[in-house]
Amino acid sequence: MVSSLERYAQGNYDDAVKQVIGAKSVRPIVKDFRKNAGAWIDGAPAPERAQRIAVVGAMSLELMAATFNQHVDDYSESRVLIEWACERFRQLPPSEVERWFHLAAIALAQGAGDKKFIDGNGRRFNFLDKHAEHPTERFPREVRFRLAIATANPEAQQIATWLLPPGYMVDPAVTMIEHQFERQLLDSSLQMLMELFDDPVVSTEARLRSGVLRFLRGDTTVAGTDLEHAEQAKDPVIRHVAHLMLGTIADQAGDASEALRHYRLAYETVPAATASVALASRLFRSGAAEEAAAVLRAFDAAVPPADPWELYGQRDFRSFTVFRHEMRKALAGVLMRPLPAEPPAAQGPATPLNLTQSRAATTGMRLPVLVQSDGEPVTDLKAADFRLIDSGVLQDILAVDTETRALDVTVVAQETTQAKSGKFQALDAEIAAVAKALTPADRLTVMLVGRDPRPFTPPGTRDLVKESYIEQRCVPVYDTLARALITPPSLGRHRVVILLTGSEGTGGFLSTGPAAEIARRASAQLYVARIEPAAGRRGHYIAEAVCPRVSMDFSKDREVRLRLAQQGLWENDQRRRLVEIAESTGGREIRPAIFRESTIAPLRDMLDEIRASYLLRYTPQGVPASGWHPITVKVTKPGSYDIRVRTGYER
């Protein structure tokens, strides 16, 4: 233990941490570290004692950081080490090492959702009491400690593009609280943020969080004013999120050009996943399908940076490596040795997207139609046997194709799910079942609903189960689904998207309305298979993303139901909405929900249906140039038929 502390003092930071941990996790060595490190401090000559306290404090911080690759119980133990080191720092005059030590420790606590560490409240962890107040008293000019306390409450951490329901903002673990009490809490958080508006260091972030909070409670005008201040920030992450929110406000006000401007600026500032789908989805919904696909191709071609949207609720967690580096620099100054090397620079902004929005006219339509009789496909129909009505106008069918087409299949799947036993599992078996049902001419790609949604050909290389135990991530189902639907099919192929999900997702940018519009415009058929929803994850992971639920989007048609609903009814409501989107594309729900090697028949039936479908080709005549076009298809040949076709399309 002493050897590792001396090695750390010499600047061999990573090697020193590995030496003290060895093959163990942090939890078993906490007691031994306190005993031996304390003796090392006490045994130093008086002039060196302050230096050793600084080394021990820095090493305590390093051990806390190491727990983010271990079990949550290790993190819980490391918090005690931080408080123990803090007591020793308080024996000395305030120093730069101590200031950066506190900033880095609070950043880790913010990443872990450890409210108890910051302001003494919270349910997730025990012990400690208002730790952030210690450095606030010792460093009154360091306003970031005040910002940490101002953003410790849930309402200052949540971000969404829809209004959050009453009661949900102040306590996501509870669905309803008394509204007057909620207003008082929200007003209190806004007041704490407003008190930081004039500080040159944190004013733009305080404005950003005030603007987001006001948007979530419906104060769009004041939110816009706050966000316009935030978009002037020097910090690209703050500018990025401000542009996304200003784009959302413009989008919901019907100003597509202003929304596009902000979404483009957000993506060019930080080329992250959420900004790419915000920009691509707005382009696609505006009729610029080729430009939308180009945005996604540009995103797919590079390793994506950390997404400021998903990390919004974890606040300074994104800056932890910077804070730790500054702590090491300050320690090197105290010990009078060379400064450590600078950490790798963050990825710069994306190359500006020089896209010109264009609306391609729909000159010809290719409409897949499945016709069944007594559950079996009908395969002998001709063009004259169909009657097709587009927007109330009878159309001339130019041709009916029946040849088998190769498929472009994309499986959109959650990174992991959770079995009833409580164990996490990857969806490898489900994806393998899809691959088994395809022919050699078909193509299969997978998009994981998580931090990296770029398509890949299975099998993947990530240890998804291990990741699930370490870090809770948002599940942006609609965002990833939109990516798959926007991607055009290869020439001569039919595009099929299979969604494996337990819900509508959490923490994404898109909600049901935009996703449904994208599905109506897309040429793909969507099939939805509902897996067992993940439950009871609390307590397994360390890093905790703040992810408002898409299922809590209180649109008017759901408000009464969801105010009174229990969890089971929420799940049924989500399933219904996903199935409706699938049916609008001519797809459907697939049952049973979880595919296994022995229960692959429903999937094979679905793919056989697609191959047995007719492709009706026609040029729309006498219909509006834009808007929603409802479609009706009937078979005029005598007999009883079941017909599955998309409900319409958007121009």
Image: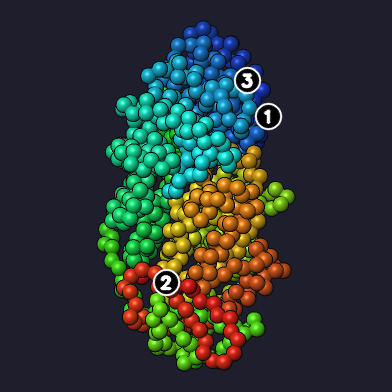
Residues at marks 1 and 2, CA–CA distance in whole angstroms: 61 Å
**Kind of residue sitting beneath label 3:** Arg
Q: Which part of the image, by quadrant, shows the N terminus?
A: top right
**Kind of residue sitting beneath label 2:** Tyr
Q: Position of residue 90 (x, y in %)?
A: 51, 13
Residue pointed to by mark 1: 28
Residue pointed to by mark 2: 649
Q: Nearer the viewer, residue 113 or 584?
A: 584
Disc 3 secondary structure class: helix
Residues at marks 3 and 2, CA–CA distance in whole angstroms: 67 Å
Q: Residue at x 62, y 57 (%)?
A: 572
Q: Position of residue 498 (x, y in %)?
A: 55, 66
Are circles 3 and 1 on residues that touch, CB within 8 Å?
Answer: no
Q: Position of residue 49 (x, y in %)?
A: 52, 11
Q: Give left or right: position of 206 versus 9.
A: left
Residue pointed to by mark 3: 34
- Which tag, 3 or 1, sits closer to the chain's start? 1
Q: Position of residue 471 (x, y in %)?
A: 57, 43
Q: Residue at x 39, y 35 (%)?
A: 210
Disc nearest the viewer among 3 and 2 = 2
